[in-house]
Amino acid sequence: MITGEDLTQSDPSPGGPSRPRRRRRRRGRTMAVIVAVVLIPVLVMGSGVVWFVWEIDTHGTPGPTVPVQIQPGWGVPRIGEELHRDHIIGSSLAFQIYARFHGDNSFQAGTYYLHTKLGVRAAVVALKRGPKINYEVLTVPPGLWLQQIAARVAKLYGRSAQTFLEGARNNSVRSIFEPAGVANLEGLLRPDTYKISNSQDEISILQTMVDTFDTRAKALGLLNADVDGYRAYQIIIIASMIEAEAKVPQDRPLIASVIYNRLAANMPLQIDSTVIYARGNPAERTLSAHDLQIPSPYNTYLHTGLPPTPIGSVSDASLLAALHPAHTTYLYYVVAGKDGHHAFASTYQQQQQNIAAAQKAGVL
């Protein structure tokens, strides 16, 4: 029967056919998921790129300059944390990414003076230039004892004489001329003028002075030297006595000859400077009869042979004199002039005459 109804329409009643609408809803949800899966990471990545680009450069005027201390052994993450803490950069992570992307995996230790709000790029450029090195001058003239050198080191900012002395006596630093069984760098520090950076501690300073001595002494031929059976360390001991005794250049090889001649004759050296060293006070240079009885291996009035160690730093001139002594028969010397030059003698009688002349001239 024909009723006039459109039999192609879906049944609107509950439970009737509705598949086309459900398919459309499913397609809508699928598209939403696809958009979310694709678009959200893109947005996150894009915002990350925007964040990274923002962190690379400064925005506005950089702030005041502040000191930043980079310690030895710090890697890029630790440096980034320090820069962030000091407000040089806004993000330690951005610094790490940028530095590693450009192959900058390490930076020199030291003090840098950087503007706050500098930005990552400028911070990396500044770090690549290296730290600002502030120097203090350390002057060590020949003849100083180890304790006197330590006192000069202690005048440098933040340095300790005690730490320096301990390093010189506990094998923290050794010279190539230091024999086995000796733990004393007396005489093995080169007298010179040094530029000491703010990053050098006492042990680093000690190492520099020892390395400088070793290099120069090798250049002078000390390493394999043999003078009358005396080898390198013993020659340094002799040079230290020459340094303490000689006041004019021409006396050095002559004093050296007296020392070697007395050693060969098994005579006590009777060198006043060794007794002063045994007494322990470098400021007091006069001796009393009592001082000559000090029971010390450094007292060359009581003991034959050489003192156990050098008695001070030595110049090239004294080392050369010990390496190349004059050929004489001298066994004695005494000061003979106000300039400090000495008169030399081969016999005791000649020595007594020289002493009388010095006393008459008012120099003894």
Image (cartoon, rainbow, N blue to C red):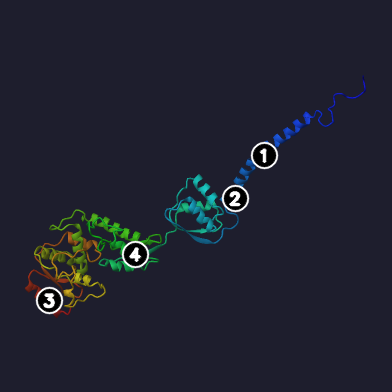
- Quote the CA–CA distance across marks 3 and 2: 86 Å
- Quote the CA–CA distance across marks 2 and 4: 48 Å
Residue corresponding to mark 3: 355
Between circles 2 and 1, the one closer to the viewer is 1
Give the mark nearer the N terminus: 2 vs 1.
1
Q: Which mark is residue 333?
A: none
Q: Which type of secondary structure does the marked residue at label 2 adopt?
A: helix
Amino acid under label 1? Ala
Q: Are marks 2 and 1 in contact (CB under 8 Å)?
A: no
Residue corresponding to mark 1: 36
Question: Residue 357's image quarter?
Answer: bottom left
Q: Which type of secondary structure does the marked residue at label 3 adopt?
A: helix
Amino acid under label 4? Thr
Q: Are marks 1 and 3 in contact (CB under 8 Å)?
A: no
Give the mark nearer the N terminus: 1 vs 3.
1
Amino acid under label 3? Ile
